[in-house]
Image: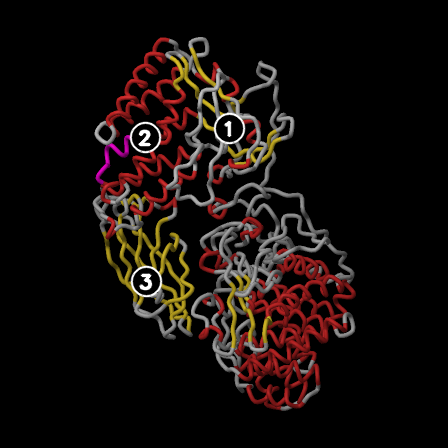
Amino acid sequence: MLLPWTRTMLYLVTIVCFLHFCHGDDTVVQMSNVQNWGWGRFQGVFSFPIKGEEVQGWEVILNFSSPVTGLMEWMGDIIKSSKDNKEYVIVNKQHNALQHNGQTLSILVQGSSSSGSVPHATGKLINMAHDGFTWDGTKYNYNDVLHKSILFYEAQRSGKLPPYNEIPWRGDSALNDSGRDGEDLTGGWYDGSNKFGFPMAASTTLLGWGLLQYQDAYHAAGLLDKMYDCMRWPLEWMIKCHTGPNELYVQIGDPNTDYNVWQRPEDMTIARPAYKIDSKHPGSDIAGEYAAAMAVGYLVFKEKDPIFARSLLDHAKQINEFALNYKGKFSDSIHACQWILQDWMGDIIKHSHENQEYILVNKPNNAIQHKGSTIDIMVQGTSDSGSPPCAIGKLINMGHDDYSVPTLPDKDATKYNYNDVLHKSIMFYEAQRSGKLPADNEISWRGDSALNDSGINGEDLTGGWYDGAGSTKFGFPMSASTTLLGWGLLQYKDAYQAAGLLDKMYDCIRWPLEWMLKCRTGPNELYIQVGDESEDHNHWERPESLKIARPAKKIDASHPGSDVAGEYAAAMTVGYLVFKEKDPSFAQNLLKNAEKINEFAESFHGRYSDSLTTGNSNYKSSSYHDELSWAGAWLYRATNQSKYLQQAETYYKQGTSWAMSWDDKSTGVAILLHNITGKEMYKQDVEATLQNWMPGGGVLYSPKGLAHRDKWGPLRYASNMAFMALLAADDGLHVDYYRKWATSQIHYALGDTGRSYVCGFGINPPTQPYHKGSSCPLDPVPCGFNIYRSRGPNPHVLYGALVSGPDNGDNFRNIRSNSMNSNVACDYNAGFQSAVAGNLSL
């Protein structure tokens, strides 16, 4: 069995080897195939030709001419960045470490430059398989690794600790360890709270060999004396264990009992039996290992401490003679020395109290098992009956669940069941919930998550929605989504009522609104993000299991964000209008906070993405004027106060809008202001924008009729504009024309081309959305990038999620890793769901 400190021992020896030999080989290239997406956002490729010797592990160092935030790439893992965000270090993933001669390693990156323009950049490829490094050029500080590995062994010490003990949380323990005749067996290293002589001796042998072979490395690191102390501790225990010519203690403690207790060694009060081998119960294997460890110890200490070394050699010879004279496996002689059960294919996560039932889950590397293959689980164990027991095994496919959302009746007999689409879209938002889930949670594969989300001063920031695939909460798109969903509920409440979904819709938008209220922690202070998008991107894991830091980011008077603050104010105001009759107290709280946040936004101008240098690359703001106008228009509609109308009209920028989105609210503002004022200028802007979206306008159309504004989220933009067209029609503008066009775009998403783009709905829907939680097997089976790379359907159907959509030729690749087609996000569904409600309301 490979025990935890055995693994560390192998690791330590390997580190010493790398300290002794290491060097790299490098290739430098320029960033090419650059795409400028505006506002400093860019995409580029670094293409490294592999020439000559193959690469068996690589590192890439990227250097940019200006600071780059939110750098994203998919070929490796970003392990380091400079303080000025100009240099990034990327290392290979496990599956692509090997690069052969004649191949090209292409690394595609996306990011945002603080300069506002695309930076120049170079990339340097280093072949990490070569040798020759010293620390000054190494990737990692091997001196530090050696020191910390030695400290790990100090943390494993049993017995009376020395006065120079450096582990403050460890104390004396197991001071009564003794043999059957009272022999002193204190000392040695723990494994749990047991002491297993076989792996302890094996570890000592390899550590000693590493010290003999690479003593110069320890000496250069200033760790030679500490390493002598490290080795001496288990060797002194092994000497104690040799209590007679043919008698050797090999274990202290009962693994069966220890397994059932989770406690520090200092506080353990369970019995600690001692087990030994002798001439009637031989163990040539473990005796041979003790002899090897002591012989290596002799070689290590023969000059450092000749007397101790001589004692080790004497014991080694006697124990070796015992091993030769009485042959046998110790585990055949002493059954109690074995574990309850061992297996190598998976991990034992649970067993019954009587030790008759065990639950194993796959390891990350063998989760995928294909049809026609066989899973062989080999186990070893000890039966209390003294004879092998009968046993059965049951295999459960954790990559599939029985959760389903029932199809709602199509009461209106429409081409597509709008009731069902609305219901499933709401379910998508339930799948995005963060925090403590309510008792009526219907998503069986979702659980409580991110329960420690907090502000800089400990403010409770739990709740809200995860943005899309990962576990980051972005306040800007979350609030924008809430505003559009709330507007759809205000405008088409009858549709939700007719579908029997009104209460579910109230619950849907209440969830993010309550989080936004928590985010306002002071008069001029607003939290706008929880989680690190870059770190989140490096893990393919369900939110419930993710164990990474989740920093919170805020705006304040010194770091303004009129855009995101304006959007929070708009969302809360819409929330007030939605809840003013349903829950007056909650509604008033929303309005009060909306007005205060709007005042903050007006008083301290600035784009939040200029104020926060990290954590906003996915949602970089282009302007704050549209959000201030947006907030003013909604506040006027809620309060009828003229100052808010003046605000809306002051910040309104006349002209054609690119698209309604989380970033650009101009079309929505124009529709609101035309409804409020009836002014011709707003009508002209609405008509000009929508005309640009109609066939023959400036927006490209796919052959099958999708208004394809952008390759990232084309269905999102088309759906948002469909919602705007329905609202404009409700306001009396080109009623039939706008409604017909809006329906065509929504029906494209629902299946007019022969496939649905809504997960769990219609014909041939997407089955591999780019979404971590739904792609991970059932908890507690581990997830990981092997799951991300698998080609099967997501184990959990992400009901109602609208995917990004096809390219401008109507081509769609239903592959999880193709995020350009398969991505999902809260803002993708907001305008879409509201447009579906609008169609149902007609």
In primary-sequence order, the first of circles 1 and 3 is: 3
Q: Is residue 842 visible?
A: no
Instruction: Name the spot of residue 245 as percent of width and height, x first.
Output: 37, 12
Residue at 22% in and 47% down? 133
Look at label 3 and name its amino acid: Glu
Instruction: Name the spot of residue 125 as percent of width and height, x first.
Output: 27, 54
Does 645 sit above or below residue 303? below
Q: Is residue 213 magenta?
A: yes
- Range of residues picked out in magenta: 208-216
Residue at which label 3 appears: 87
Q: Quadrant of the N terminus?
A: top left
Residue at 44% in and 75% down? 610
Residue at 58% in and 50% down? 544
Q: Neighbour class for label 1 at 10 Å: few (<14), some, many (≥20)?
A: some
Q: Quadrant of the C terminus?
A: bottom right
Does 326 sit above or below residue 305? above
Q: Secondary structure at mark 1?
A: strand
Q: Do labels 1 and 2 touch, CB within 8 Å?
A: no
Residue at which label 1 appears: 343
